[in-house]
């Protein structure tokens, strides 16, 4: 009897393992999101349905071949837009760097040709998702994160009323958390090394551009410390950084120390902003708590950890641009660098009109050097 029971449970376990292997190997059918529900026997519809069946079963090459046949044969079909979207979706489902590159090109073509369709917003949302999935950690190249930021902002600009807008807005907060962390690590490196001009420059741009960053209060504190150590000339800048902590991050652990700093600098201490107070309470209540193994698995994770990203507030509507170093004298220090070139006519030439042209009087040529006399030749 025990042997029979053990054989029964062994067969059950074997069946479960086989089912898991079959599902992981792609035998499980994944339904397509945008099928054509109309029941018709039109040849273009038959081709579309066949491609979708292959797409759902992971036969992406066969599905793309069928869709290309539909597009080239029935160029005036009513299902042409659906076929182009399914062609892009096949690359999206296949994944990988090559699959994502082809999918992005196909989605952009779809948006270009069908900008008024409801699926255009979905195409842009998937472009945003592809860039989001390819993001690196904050200590690595931020190129994919910056591209993801641009694509997500493009959806909010082109399709603000789309059903994907709330999801993409949260993705944008996550992306900007990674970009801000990338900038913070650079500024903190300079701060630790004692290069306070460089740290103030990086942290100033960070705190101005990404106020939703989870370490914005810590960044402002180190910004104030950098300005303090640069001398009395930057006392106003330091006071401004400490004031932001007290006003916009009142629940921060640095808030009380910031008040003491302002008192020692004989600067006014602002009152906490009630909107900022409520936002911080919401963030603390809804912040994801890391699991017990999160630090261990983080070593093997390719993508960044965005558990500390903000869950509310409007994300920045542009990428962070470099600013002028704070050591540059004048009112332009700390402002965003521009690349605008202006051309204007000079009304008063000044020295150009009154003084003679130096090119008309070239300097005199140096006299030729005399060759030393040659020694006398001996007589023969």
Image: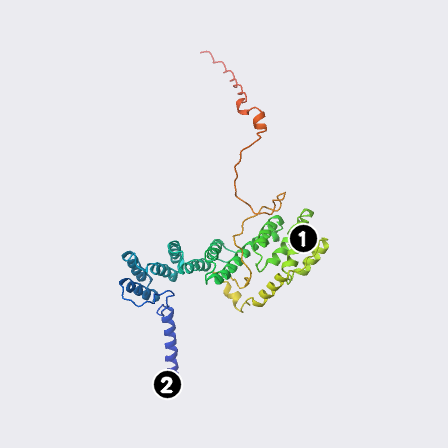
In this rendering, is residue 344 above or below 92?
Answer: above
Q: Residue 278: image x %, image y %?
A: 61, 64
Mark 2 vs mark 1: in front: 1
The 10 Å Cα crowd at callout 2, few under 14, some 14 to 19, many 20 or more, is few
State the SS at label 2: helix
Q: Residue 71: image x %, image y %?
A: 30, 57
Q: Quadrant of residue 188?
A: bottom right
**Circle number at residue 281:** none
Q: Look at the image and tell me in which quarter the C terminus lies.
A: top left
In this rendering, is residue 158 above or below 347?
Answer: below
Instruction: Please give left or right for residue 200 compared with residue 74 in the image.
Output: right
Q: Residue 372: image x %, image y %?
A: 52, 17
The residue to which callout 1 is attached is 239
Q: Do tag 2 and tag 1 residues touch (Cβ < 8 Å)? A: no
Tell me what residue is drawn at x 67 percent, y 53 percent. Answer: 239
The 10 Å Cα crowd at callout 1, few under 14, some 14 to 19, many 20 or more, is many
The residue to which callout 2 is attached is 4
Question: Considering only order in the chain, which callout, 1 or 2, is on the residue closer to the N terminus?
Answer: 2
């Amino acid at each position: 009897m025990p042997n029979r029971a053990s054989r029964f449970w062994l067969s059950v376990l074997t069946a479960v393992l086989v089912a898991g292997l079959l599902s992981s190997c792609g035998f499980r059918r994944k339904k397509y999101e945008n099928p054509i529900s109309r029941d018709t026997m039109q040849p273009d519809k038959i081709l579309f349905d066949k491609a979708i069946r292959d797409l759902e079963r992971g036969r992406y090459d066969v599905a793309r071949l069928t869709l290309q046949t539909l597009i080239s044969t029935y160029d005036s079909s009513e299902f042409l837009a659906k076929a182009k979207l399914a062609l892009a979706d096949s690359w999206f489902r296949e994944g990988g760097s090559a699959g994502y590159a082809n999918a992005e090109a196909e989605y952009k073509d779809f948006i270009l040709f069908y900008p008024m369709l409801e699926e255009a917003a979905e195409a842009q949302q998937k472009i945003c998702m592809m860039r989001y999935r390819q993001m690196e950690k904050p200590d690595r190249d931020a190129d994919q994160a910056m591209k993801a930021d641009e694509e997500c902002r493009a959806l909010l600009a082109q399709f603000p009323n789309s059903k994907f807008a709330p999801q993409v807005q949260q993705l944008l907060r996550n992306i900007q958390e990674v970009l801000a962390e990338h900038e913070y690590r650079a500024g903190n490196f300079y701060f630790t090394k004692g290069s306070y001009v460089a740290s103030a420059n990086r942290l100033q741009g960070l705190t101005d551009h990404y106020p939703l960053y989870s370490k914005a209060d810590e960044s402002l504190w180190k910004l104030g410390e950098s300005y303090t150590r640069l001398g009395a000339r930057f006392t106003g800048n330091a006071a401004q950084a400490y004031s932001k902590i007290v006003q916009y991050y009142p629940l921060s652990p640095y808030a009380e120390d910031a008040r003491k700093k302002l008192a020692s600098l004989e600067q006014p201490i602002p009152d906490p902003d009630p909107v900022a107070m409520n936002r911080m309470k919401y963030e603390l209540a809804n912040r994801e708590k890391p699991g017990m193994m999160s630090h261990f698995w983080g070593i093997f994770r390719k993508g960044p950890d965005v558990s500390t990203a903000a869950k509310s507030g409007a994300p920045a509507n542009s990428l962070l641009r470099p600013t002028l170093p704070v050591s540059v004298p004048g009112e332009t220090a700390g402002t965003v660098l521009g690349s605008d070139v202006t051309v204007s006519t000079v009304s008063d030439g000044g020295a150009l009109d009154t003084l003679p042209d130096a090119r008309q009087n070239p300097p005199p040529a140096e006299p030729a050097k005399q060759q030393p006399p040659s020694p006398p030749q001996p007589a023969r």
